[in-house]
Amino acid sequence: MLELRNIDVSFRSEKQESIFRAKRIQVLHGISLEVPEGLCLGMLGESGSGKSTTGRVLCGLLKPDKGQVLLNGKDVYHTKEGRKALREYISIVFQDYTTSANPRFQVKDIIAEGLQMYRRRTGKRFDISPEVNSLLEQVGLDKSFLTRYPHELSGGQLQRVCIARAIGCHTPMIVLDEAISSLDAHTQVQIMDLLKELKVRYGLTYIFITHDLTAITYLCDRVLFLYQGQVVEECCVSEIAEVKNEYAQKLLSAIIDFEEGT
Amino acid sequence: MLKKFLKNKVAMLTTILIVFVAFVGIFAPILAPNDPYKTDILNKFSTFSLSYPLGTDHLGRCVFSRMLYGIRPTLGLAALTMLGTIGLGALMGLLAGYFRGWIDEIIMRVVDVMLSFPSQIMVFAVVALLGINVQNVILANVFVKWAWYARMIRTGVLKYRDRNFVLFSRCIGNRESFILGRHLLPSIASEMAVLASLDIGWAIINISTLSFLGLGVQAPIPEWGAMLNEAKNVLTTNPVQMLAPGIAIVVVVSAFHLLGDALRDILDPKEANL
């Protein structure tokens, strides 16, 4: 189980008024959350609410100012074993597919990177290329994609490759940081169905960061509402209509109004 | 990439010229009509002839042969200088740009100090300090120029270190050597190639300047800068003697500069992505 306890994160402000005392802007205020295994946790919030920052803290890329990240009770940022354990526990799919793959790598190299890590971590001996083929097949792409470069793929295809890469690490948890937000509606549904299928097949845990309520209700079991760097509400998706927090209600009604209006 | 390179006329022509010059330098013993060290004082300042295609100098040595042999130290030393500079600069730039923190601070402050001295004076100072010697000339050039490269490469690394593919590698805990060697170095390689081809011209001129001033390659060895120095002494009596090494330097340096310009056009990502 992955757990955040009272996480504070601040960034150095671009506009500095004094030379000696750096002014900082706090973006996360005491975030606490738990991710039990096998769950799909949705994180919902408007842009600037700290969703992606929380995601970065979760996957070990950003050290928080205060608070602890605990993986099965071990502190991730302050002990070496914890850091190593997190790397073997988590993998990520990004929103911006244009930069998430090295433009100089072919599809097979992109996917192989995750597999190589898996191979090194477990010490298992297996051939990488048949594994790459099977992963590619699982995300619904055929062998002709193997030797293509990222700029020769469409957004949905490249996002599938990124998902294959994340799956290839064989980690129990995947953070999906707005992984479908920059795709069109039809492709979104396809990718979400793919994610659902893979979740069952590998018994994965997802953390699904998005601003899209419908995607959350489609995919997730629990949902967190983030507002100005704080968790304002947490509930099951089935009870989403009964949220008590003012902001969460406003967010819900705004989206529902918008959908009814169109 | 290769196709664009073949299509670019300037890049092709300059590359062919440079490769040709390099080969002529390598096969100088076969191609040169005369021994570049053999003096024939009675035959000095002779004009163009079949046996001496570019005439002879003040000691009666064949200018053409000396020019061919001169390719070796000129081009070779320049290449060696660039190799050293880029190697050291890339290492420092990668370390500073990728790891940030105190490593970055230390390296960049050293770079600031290095860059605050005028480079030519620094080269003279280093050569004067270490002694007049070919190795020391290269050392001095590397010593002065690496800081410049470190800063350029650090900027390139900063641009790429927060790209998602690097973040992914870090998230799943891939080795630093993989991230640096497979992700970051190839990403900045094209910018480095442009810089290097522009700067190798600088290195040639610099080495020739030092030889001209008598601080670089020493007297009997044929080097274009040293040849110019010799020609300078007989400027009034035999002005033709300075033409061969002078034109040779101009042509080769221009070729490198044009190649650098053309490479920049070829590797421009805005055009490459089309």
Image (cartoon, coloured by chain):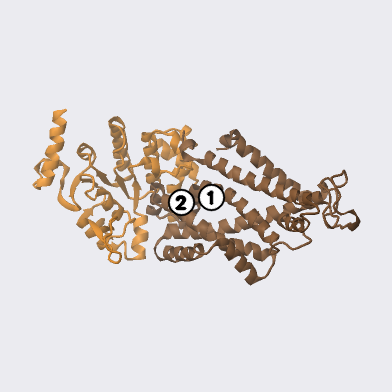
Chain colours: A orange, B brown
- Residue under label 2: B156
Mark with earlier residue (2, 1) = 2
Image position of B267 (left or right of A254):
right
Q: Is label 2 in contact with label 1 (beta carbons under 8 Å)?
A: yes
Query: Looking at the rendering, which quadrant does residue A236 occupy?
Result: top left
Q: Position of residue A115 (x, y in %)?
A: 44, 48
**Residue at image coords 83%, 56%:** B58
Disc on res. A47: none
Image position of A19 (left or right of B267):
left
Tag 2: amino acid: Gly
Q: Is residue B126 above or below residue B73?
A: below
Dot 1: few (<14), some (14–19), or many (≥20) neighbours within 10 Å?
some
Q: Report helix, strand or loop for mark 2.
A: helix
Q: Chain of mark 1?
A: B
Q: Position of residue A131 (x, y in %)?
A: 45, 42
Q: Report helix, strand or loop for mark 1.
A: helix
Tag 1: amino acid: Met
The residue lying furthest to the right in this view is B42
Q: Is residue A160 above or below residue B58?
A: above
Q: Position of residue A112 (x, y in %)?
A: 46, 45
Q: Is residue A175 above or below residue A197?
A: below
Q: Quadrant of the C terminus of chain A?
A: top left
**Residue A72 seen in render:** no
Total labels drawn:
2
Q: Chain of mark 2?
A: B
Disc on res. B192: 1
